[in-house]
């Protein structure tokens, strides 16, 4: 997993709450055998609507999604996180996330930044008034910011310490486990010799 | 300090322990199949990682495998892609695979024990919730998600928080008309589908000791259906006997060493269980489900319950919606329920002893008009063994269909599916809405009840068969 310290990219205002994982990617798109290519199924039901935010030129290349509360509730499918990442998103900002979605995000390296309702509202207004504008997220300082001068939005976001540490270090669960290589090798050395092998 | 069986196995597999972190456990055996493994292999590829211990990994094709036209390519393109992907991945990463057509192919939870790869005192995982089956040998075995599959492939370990310990004391002995399947269905109805949540469950007591290995697998298989993390049974002479001589069983001195270790795998006197539940085996009679979760079951001799019978509002509502989906009236005697299709198979009841018992019962009978009976062996070996014993002829003479090996109608991912409204009596483990096909209605039963039902055309037990003189 790549280290995540800070990111600046085009923000897409998704003015909806309770976007569950079925809406993020419907079940019919889960049949792929890769962890990539799920961008086709991202928000599938809305993508045919020309008014949908990601169908507008200025937001097409967005990497920061700004959504309403209870983003990512419902089914545990990891494909929801993969679909967002496959599309190009690095960060999702929301006042509240579904538990499993937040866990899956941490595993996969997508930053789920939890902010105050009013920050989301301010970002929505700003991004709609300035299509294609950027949002910056600093994981070290735990801040999210956008705009210049008197309109500047800057506030803090919450993320649990363990996930933040893993993202900053670029460690996925596997990388963390592999950092205990010595322990694994030691265990392998003391395994009982009669245990079965398949090869 | 006194320890439970599960604690002993757990402690023997701890690679690393640190406060505030889950234990890192070593995994002795990782089983793979085509549905939950593709993204895990893809993840390895993306991060440039290898399979750490291909020699502790085994893959089979089971979920998508058709059970007819075995010589033709799989017709459904999605199923075919998943199977072909597994083949490519196994080749690329050096993992042993038993593909369709291979003599060792079959349902992953039938194949492991059959090869002698499932042994006492192991940690066994698979991207499939019925991995609990392998606990019958006195191992900690549980299902995992796709990210965890990747984690095990890359590291052969898994971070796990230690579950609580539960003992299920099964006293007395099963009566002649009752089977291991009835016992586990009765237990799940007693404890409800969430009763085992957060626990590793040890099935103990006289009745459990008396079970054969394949009956023990039926019990442990359904641990997940009442929410348990894993279910296990202490190994004993029955276990050793079953393993001895199988392709991957230890031999010579290794065998003696292994047995000596396996004998130590019992719960110590005075070990602490966080929870103990009891069940009197002698009270168990043929048991069937009426609803849409495995906990919604009653003895065959009873009637479909009324939602009003349930005090708990959530259970009452679940009963209402289950009756609606199942198309059943409260108060209908279970025996009056007509069945269209009987499925004998799955990782719960698709082993040779299940088929022998079913063949013995169906011999000399005919499948009822308007009912079809599908017999699907759990593995190619089981199929060949059954054919050698002439069981296939017995089934066919009775008018049942004899199929190739696989998961088949257990989950309807291959073409073996129920049509909307079609009602089945199934020896599998899940009666969820749509599990066996969209709109299909499933009653979970033992192989005994399955056969009697197939012959009489309504839910019935072997005793009913005798009475009917059919
Ligand atoms: S037989 Fe059914 S429960 Fe068993 S592994 Fe196959 S699909 Fe799963």
Image (tube, coloured by chain):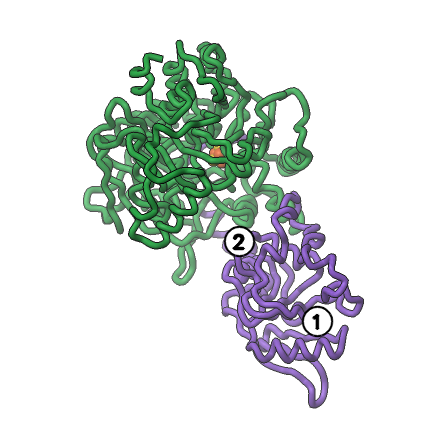
Chain colours: A purple, B green
Q: Residue at x 59, y 81 (%)?
A: A155
Is B82 positioned to the left or the right of B309 in the image?
right
Q: Chain of mark 2?
A: A
The image position of residue B100, as x and y in percent, is 60, 25
- Residue with the mark numbered 1: A11
Q: Earlier in the sequence, mark 1 or mark 2?
A: 1
Residue A119 quadrant: bottom right
User: Percent x, y for residue B279?
Assistant: 24, 38
**Which residue is more in the foreground, A106 or B439?**
B439
- Dividing the picture into quadrants, the one containing residue B313 is bottom left
Q: How many marks?
A: 2
* Residue at image coords 61%, 52%: A79
Which image quadrant is residue A120 in? bottom right
Residue A72 place in picture, x, y as percent: 56, 61
Q: Residue at x 69, y 59 (%)?
A: A46
- Check disc 1 and report its element: helix, strand or loop: strand
Chain letter, disc 1 residue: A
Distance in Å between CA atoms under marks 1 and 2:
26 Å
Q: Which residue is mark 2?
A: A76
Callout 1: 10 Å neighbours few (<14), some, many (20+)? many
Residue drawn at the location 43% of the way across and 29% of the way down: B425
The image's mark for residue B170 is none
């Amino acid at each position: 997993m790549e280290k995540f310290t800070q990111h600046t990219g085009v923000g897409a205002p998704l003015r909806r709450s309770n976007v569950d994982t079925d809406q993020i990617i419907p079940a019919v798109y889960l049949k792929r055998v890769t962890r990539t290519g799920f961008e086709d199924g991202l928000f599938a039901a809305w993508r045919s609507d020309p008014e949908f935010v990601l169908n507008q030129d200025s937001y097409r290349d967005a990497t920061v999604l700004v959504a309403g509360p209870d983003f990512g509730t419902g089914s545990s499918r990891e494909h929801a996180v993969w679909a967002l990442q496959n599309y190009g998103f690095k960060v999702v900002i929301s006042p509240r996330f579904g538990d499993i979605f937040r866990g899956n995000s941490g595993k996969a390296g997508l930053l789920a930044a939890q902010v105050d309702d009013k920050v989301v509202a301010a970002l929505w207004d700003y991004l709609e008034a300035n299509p294609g504008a950027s949002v910056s997220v600093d994981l070290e300082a735990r801040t999210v910011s956008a705009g210049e001068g008197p309109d500047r939005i800057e506030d803090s976001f919450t993320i649990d310490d363990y996930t933040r540490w893993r993202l900053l270090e670029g460690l996925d669960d596997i990388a963390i486990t592999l950092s205990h290589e010595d322990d694994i090798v030691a265990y392998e050395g003391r395994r009982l010799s009669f245990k079965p092998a398949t090869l | 300090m006194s320890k439970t069986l599960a604690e002993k196995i757990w402690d023997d597999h701890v690679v690393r322990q640190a406060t505030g972190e889950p234990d890192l456990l070593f995994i002795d055996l990782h089983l793979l199949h085509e549905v939950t493994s593709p993204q895990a292999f893809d993840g390895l590829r993306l991060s440039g990682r290898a399979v750490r211990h291909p020699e502790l990994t085994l893959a089979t094709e089971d979920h998508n495998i058709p059970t007819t036209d075995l010589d033709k390519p799989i017709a459904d393109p999605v199923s075919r892609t998943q199977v072909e992907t597994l083949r490519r991945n196994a080749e690329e990463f050096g993992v042993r695979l038993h593909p369709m057509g291979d003599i060792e192919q079959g349902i992953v939870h039938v194949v492991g024990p059959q090869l002698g790869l499932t042994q006492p005192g192991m940690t066994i995982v698979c991207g499939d919730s019925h991995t609990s089956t392998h606990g019958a040998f006195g191992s900690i075995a549980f299902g995992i998600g796709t990210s965890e599959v990747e984690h095990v492939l890359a590291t052969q370990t898994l971070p796990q928080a230690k579950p609580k310990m539960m003992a299920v004391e099964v006293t007395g002995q099963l009566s002649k008309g009752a089977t291991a399947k009835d016992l586990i269905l009765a237990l799940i109805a007693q404890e409800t589908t969430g009763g085992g949540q957060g626990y590793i469950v040890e099935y103990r007591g006289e009745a459990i000791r008396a079970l054969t290995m394949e009956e023990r697998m039926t019990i442990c298989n359904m641990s997940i259906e009442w929410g348990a993390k894993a279910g296990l049974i202490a190994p004993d002479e029955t276990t050793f006997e079953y393993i001895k001589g199988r392709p991957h069983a230890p031999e010579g001195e290794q065998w003696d060493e292994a047995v000596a270790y396996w004998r130590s795998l019992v719960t110590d006197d005075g070990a602490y269980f966080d929870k103990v539940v009891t069940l009197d085996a002698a009270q168990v009679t043929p048991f069937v489900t009426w609803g849409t979760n495995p906990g919604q079951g009653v003895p065959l001799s009873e009637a479909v319950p009324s939602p009003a019978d349930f005090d708990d509002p959530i259970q009452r509502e679940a009963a209402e919606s289950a009756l609606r989906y199942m198309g059943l009236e409260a108060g209908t005697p279970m025996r009056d329920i007509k069945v269209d299709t009987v499925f004998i198979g799955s990782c719960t009841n698709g082993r040779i002893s299940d088929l022998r018992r079913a063949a013995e019962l169906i011999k000399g009978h005919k499948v009822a008009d308007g009912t079809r009976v599908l017999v699907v062996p759990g593995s190619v070996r089981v199929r060949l063994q059954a054919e050698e014993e002439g069981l296939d002829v017995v089934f066919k003479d009775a008018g049942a269909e004899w199929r190739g090996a696989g998961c088949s109608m257990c989950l309807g991912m291959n073409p073996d599916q129920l049509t909307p409204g079609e009602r089945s009596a199934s020896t599998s483990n899940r009666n969820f809405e749509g599990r066996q096909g969209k709109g299909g209605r499933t009653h979970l039963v033992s192989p005994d009840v399955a056969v009697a039902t197939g012959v009489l055309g309504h839910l019935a037990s072997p005793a009913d068969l005798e009475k009917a003189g059919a």
